[in-house]
Image (tube, helix red, strand yellow):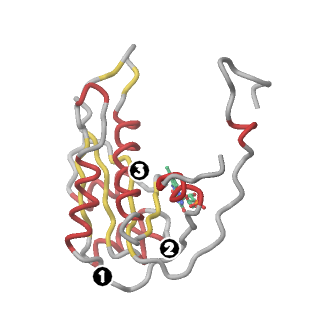
Amino acid sequence: MSHLSRVHSLSRNRQAVRRFADRPVPPELLERILDCGRYAVSAGEDQPWRFIVVQERLTRHRLSEAAFNSEYVKTAPIVIVGCARVHSRISGHGKPAFPTDLAVATQSMAIGAVDQGLQVAWITGFRESIVRSLLGVPPDIPVVTLLCIGYPDGFERLPPRRPFTEVVAWDRWEGGAE
Ligand SMILES: Cc1cc2nc3c(=O)[nH]c(=O)nc-3n(C[C@H](O)[C@H](O)[C@H](O)COP(=O)(O)O)c2cc1C
């Protein structure tokens, strides 16, 4: 694997961000990011996502409180709240597809953001009921992810990745349950 493709290079050379700079994101960049999510693949082409774009300072502050005072949410100029229509299709043998669909759309938006010089942070640890009432999300609509987007305020080294041989198996499961 000597030559890095563009996406491979983005994946390998990504840096972790813990705080965002107090710098606005141009609207055209945000629209492109949202369009990356809109065009994401989904089970049964159901497109169950609904993205709430939160930019208002007070609402972001409240969101950060709901996310256990997350520094990411507190400092990001934009937080995209990913919700799912639960009456969306159930794939395969009754396993809900919406968490995976939302993850795919979130990753598409993340790549769209990084490709334009921005950085992102995902949050799944938040009090869903508080986020729901804060943003007026109906009770039967799950709130799946928060995606914080902005320009980075410094970087940290990426945590080391597990070696290739530990995470990839060929043709069948290898090793024990660990
Ligand atoms: C699906 C997902 C959920 C995450 N949820 C949280 C969270 O609730 N709170 C938090 O502080 N970080 C959260 N993170 C951030 C990760 O814990 C990690 O700090 C971040 O991805 C930086 O890792 P990196 O060094 O690989 O970029 C989440 C990341 C992902 C991908």
Q: Of tags 2 and 3, which is closer to the observer? A: 3
Queried on whether the Cβ of the residue with tag 2 lies below 8 angstroms from ligand 1, the answer reads yes
The residue indicated by pointer 1 is 24
At horizontal 34% and vertical 34% (from top left) the residue drawn is: 98
Give, as a three-letter code, the residue at label 2.
Glu
Q: Real-space Cα distance between discs 2 and 3? A: 20 Å
Residue 58 pos. (x, y %)? 29, 77
Residue 11 is labelled as none
Residue bearing the label numbered 2:
71
In the rendered structure, the answer to whether residue 119 lies left or right of residue 84 reads right
> Regarding mark 1 in the picture, which secondary structure is present there?
loop
Horizontal arrangement in the rendering, residue 150 relative to residue 51 (left or right):
right
Furthest residue in direction bottom, as rendered? 22
Instruction: Look at 69% across and 27% down and name the residue there.
Output: 169
Image quadrant in which the C terminus is located: top right
Drawn side of residue 92 relative to residue 88, left or right: right
Residue that appears at 34% across and 46% down:
105
How many other residues sit within 10 Å of disc 1, few (<14), some (14-19) or many (≥20)? few
Above or below, 75 relative to 145 = below
Camera-near label (1 vs 2) is 1
Tag 3 or tag 2, which sits nearer the N-term?
A: 2
Q: CA distance from mark 1 to mark 3?
A: 22 Å
Instruction: Reply above or below: 109 against 92.
Output: below
Indicate if the residue with disc 1 has its beta carbon within 8 Å of ligand 1: no
N-terminal of the pair, mark 1 or mark 2, is: 1
Residue tagged 3: 107
Q: Amino acid at mark 1?
A: Pro
Q: How many numbered discs sit on the rendered protein?
A: 3
Question: Residue sitting at 67 percent across and 33 percent down?
Answer: 168
| Tag 1 and tag 2, C-beta contact below 8 Å | no
